[in-house]
Amino acid sequence: MIKCEEVLAELANYIDEEVTAELRAQIEAHLRMCRNCTVLVNTTRRTLTVVADNFIAPLPKSISDRLIERLGLHS
């Protein structure tokens, strides 16, 4: 049985569907039994979807001002 560490090491390849059929089957069997890895895979997929959809969350002005100040970008 594949271990959590191995799932983590192959996470990007698994999500990108760049693993062998055998490894995919092992990961999916592990996911059926491991809630932590299932949450990790699902959260990573959702995060990638948000990023891929060019989601832009507006920053509150106070945070934006502090960031600009910290980066020395103020005029």
Image (cartoon, helix red, strand yellow):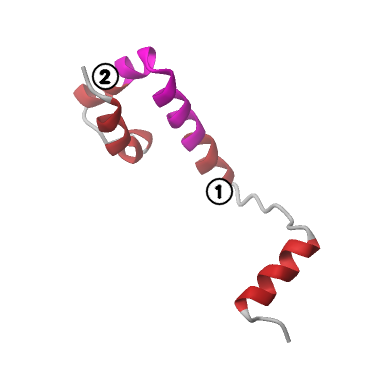
Q: Which quadrant would the C terminus be assigned to in this image?
A: bottom right
Q: Say which residue appears at 73% left-offset and 58% top-offset.
A: 59
> Where residue 70 sits in the image (x, y, percent)?
63, 74
> Where residue 27 sits in the image (x, y, percent)?
29, 23
Classified by dominant secondary structure, the portion drawn in magenta counts as helix
> Is residue 62 shown above or below 4?
below
Residue 20 lies in what quarter of the image?
A: top left
- 40 drawn magenta: yes
Kindly identify the amino acid type of the residue bearing the numbered disc 2: Ala
Would you call the spot at circle 2 few (<14 residues within 10 Å), some (14-19), or many (20 or more)?
few
Mark 2 vs 1, N-terminal side: 2
In screen coordinates, is 61 left or right of 73?
right
Q: Which residue is mark 1?
A: 51
Q: Say which residue appears at 43% left-offset and 30% top-offset.
A: 41
Kindly identify the amino acid type of the residue bearing the numbered disc 1: Val
Residue 29 lies in what quarter of the image?
A: top left
Q: Say which residue appears at 50% left-offset and 43% top-offset.
A: 48
Dot 1 lies on which element? helix
Q: Who is closer to the viewer here, 23 or 63?
A: 63
Would you call the spot at circle 1 few (<14 residues within 10 Å), some (14-19), or many (20 or more)?
few
> Is residue 35 shown above or below 54?
above
Magenta range: 28-44
Q: Who is closer to the viewer here, 7 or 19?
A: 7
Q: Which residue is mark 2?
A: 25
> Is residue 64 shown above or below 23?
below
